[in-house]
Image: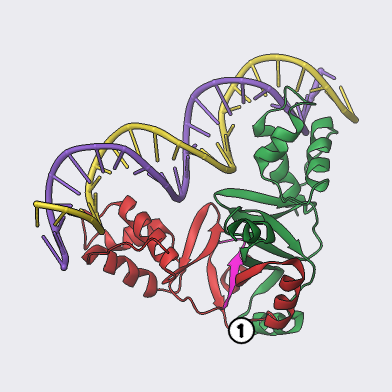
Chain colours: A green, B red, C purple, D yellow
Amino acid sequence: MQTEKKRNYSRKREAILKAVRSTTCHPTADWVYQQLKPEYPDLSLGTVYRNLTQFKSDGVIMSVGTVNGQERFDGNVRPHTHFVCCRCHGVLDVPGDFVSENEVASAAKKMGLKVESGDVILHGVCAECLKREN
Amino acid sequence: MQTEKKRNYSRKREAILKAVRSTTCHPTADWVYQQLKPEYPDLSLGTVYRNLTQFKSDGVIMSVGTVNGQERFDGNVRPHTHFVCCRCHGVLDVPGDFVSENEVASAAKKMGLKVESGDVILHGVCAECLKREN
DNA sequence: CTCCGTGCAAATACTTTGCAAAGCG
DNA sequence: CGCTTTGCAAAGTATTTGCACGGAG
């Protein structure tokens, strides 16, 4: 049996989730904090971290991984591909999946792994940075 | 023109590279440090970090990403797939590529991206942890 | 009234960096 | 010798946590 925790309503929690969902910039905890600070002057960064962690384990948001030392979140939990720019450290969504479910499943089976999710992360230089460099 | 730096020989640097290459555990900086400490009692963690960073930018090792707050390295720079266990945070190599170069290339072209590398990271529970849980 | 959620600040954990000394070429 | 590499310790950054108080049910 799992530990189920009661959960009260919280205006701030709702706002945090909405903030993550409202952007495609794959924000950091601090971005969310800065974003909401004007409207919630007494918001604290710790609260943002606590809620993001919770959302993540609830599966309502996902982590894109750590880019340049900061964790990046994504409100879109449908599987999709990410592109990370080495220059500006921006994260972009790339439409498409690119992984063969079947191949993965068979490789996993062979190794006795239980695969729960699979991410594709491309690295390179984004269009903006390319332009700037030429 | 690129910044080319002269590079002297260093016994410790060599040992650090060898340590990363000698294992398939996808070590952290600290693992490498602990590993070499007995043989090089005056080795410092800063040196390990400095060298790993250098190797990474030289392309002789690669980063698997940050797992559980620590960066994991891989001495095998040929493209391959990684599996990260949610329970024990172990990182395993999975033979196979699973990404379609062509599809990626065409999606990238459409978005004006210059893709330099692509990683597939699977998440789930490894065989050992599965066994332990049953 | 009873827990949950939060602000605040202190504590952690990892990684980076400045500087003087030691090493390579 | 000149420039690189390192040890050491201090600094830096991102994230987590303890505690007392305000808020939801």
Mark 1 = which residue?
B96
Q: Quadrant where the C terminus of chain B lies?
A: bottom right
Residue A134 horizontal/vertical position (percent): 60, 61
Chain identity of mark 1: B
Residue A118 horizontal/vertical position (percent): 70, 69
Please state the extent of the stretch shown in magenta in the rendering: B80-88
Q: B110 or A108, which is in the foreground?
A: B110
Q: C25 or A48, which is in the foreground?
A: C25
Q: A130 or B42, which is in the foreground?
A: A130
Residue B129 located left or right of residue C17: right
When the figure is inspected, residue D17 is found, relative to residue A71, above or below; the finding is: above
What's the amino acid at mark 1? Gly
When the figure is inspected, residue B29 is found, relative to residue C12, above or below; the finding is: below
Q: Quadrant where the N terminus of chain B lies?
A: bottom left
Which residue sits at x=73%, y=50%?
Answer: A25
Residue A10 horizontal/vertical position (percent): 83, 32
Residue A105 located left or right of residue B19: right
Judge whether residue A80 is colored magenta: no
When the figure is inspected, residue A52 is found, relative to residue C24, above or below; the finding is: above
Q: A68 or B28, which is in the foreground?
A: A68
Q: Quadrant location of residue A93?
A: bottom right
Q: Quadrant location of residue D19?
A: top right
Residue A79 located left or right of residue A120: right
Residue A80 located left or right of residue B37: right
